[in-house]
Amino acid sequence: MATHQFEPDHYFSTIGSHPPVLRVQPGDSVETTTVDARGHDSSGQAVTSGGNPMTGPFYVEGAEPGDTLVVHLDKLLCNRPYGWTRTMVAPNVVDPEQVPNMPWPAEGQELANWRVDNEAGTVTLVEPQTSLGALTLPLAPMPGCFGVAPDRGEAISTATSGPFGGNMDYRGFVEGVTVYLPVFVPGALFHIGDGHAVQGDGEIVGTGVEISFDVGFTVDVQKGRRIYWPRGENETYIFAAGNARPLDQATQHATTEMIRWLENDLGIDPVGAHILMGQTVEYDLGNIYDPAYTMICKMPKAVLP
């Protein structure tokens, strides 16, 4: 097991079978950096074009189609003292008759600026001036977009998501979480980026507090374990992500993946799994802004056998 220090010099705005930037073994860790959604690095310089540019891909030796890639999120650290957001919720999350009454920003006033303080663990609104004053929120770093190369040589925009992961914008993917991803191509080809200092459910303004990151992660491979949609695990929950549009289809994918997890991996009989989910399941909303929406189906570990 080794720890690799990787300094990116190019980025991808699609998740696909791009030439790997680094080859690692199962059990290895990687420490690297990401740029923000507009391609700005830790110094604020634009080093690549915008559109959620990804660091990677990282080739994991031995990962083959039909396996599961395991990624433990070891470190998600904001590496500059400011971030930005958009200022208006998306028209698709309000009633149609409300859309004309929304605070449409004037040209050049579409973004809000935030101060990010790692030491204090806070994010503070700097501008524009509103009745909120210097709104201060707890820092909660999470990557909005990550995943593995899709099947059949596809390269899919980092604006969206699918079985491979992608722009899920789920605030539960935080430091300490273990992520499971289906492997579609040799080496899995893991990408990561789109750092958020904090973000509400759904990313309903189209951004979190966008920022660049110092990132650390550890990879492993579960041979012959086939999953169909991204999964995650923390101290309290196991959870599955469904990515699709409309939202009910995303919910179907997430719920089906959880049923598979309970029955195939945890050995719960089908009737027992359905009864248990019926009374204990929880759902979180991931992205509801981008082309594919994300629904998270969660099961508390306390109720699992």
Image (spheres, grey):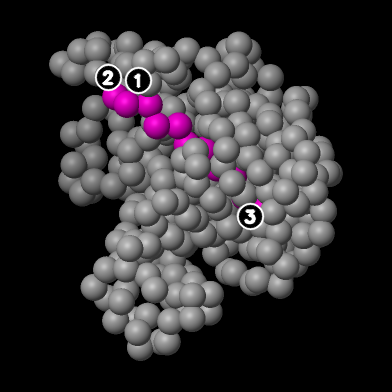
Dot 3, how many residues are within 10 Å of its Cα: few (below 14), some (14-19), or many (20+)? many
Res 41 → quadrant? top right
Q: Quadrant of the N terminus?
A: top right
Q: Report if residue 148 lies within the magenta region.
A: yes
Dot 2, how many residues are within 10 Å of its Cα: few (below 14), some (14-19), or many (20+)? some
Q: In this view, which residue lies farthest toward the left? A: 131
Identify the amino acid type marked 2: Thr
Disc 1 secondary structure class? strand
**Distance between mark 2 and mark 1 Cα atoms:** 6 Å
Q: Quadrant of the C terminus?
A: bottom left
The answer to whether mark 2 and mark 1 are in CB contact below 8 A is yes
Q: Nearer the viewer, residue 305 or 56?
A: 305
Q: Which residues are magenta?
A: 137-149
Disc 3 secondary structure class? strand
Q: Position of residue 2 (x, y in %)?
A: 78, 39
**In the rendered view, does 289 fall on the left or right side of 179?**
left
Q: Which residue is disc 2 drawn over?
A: 136
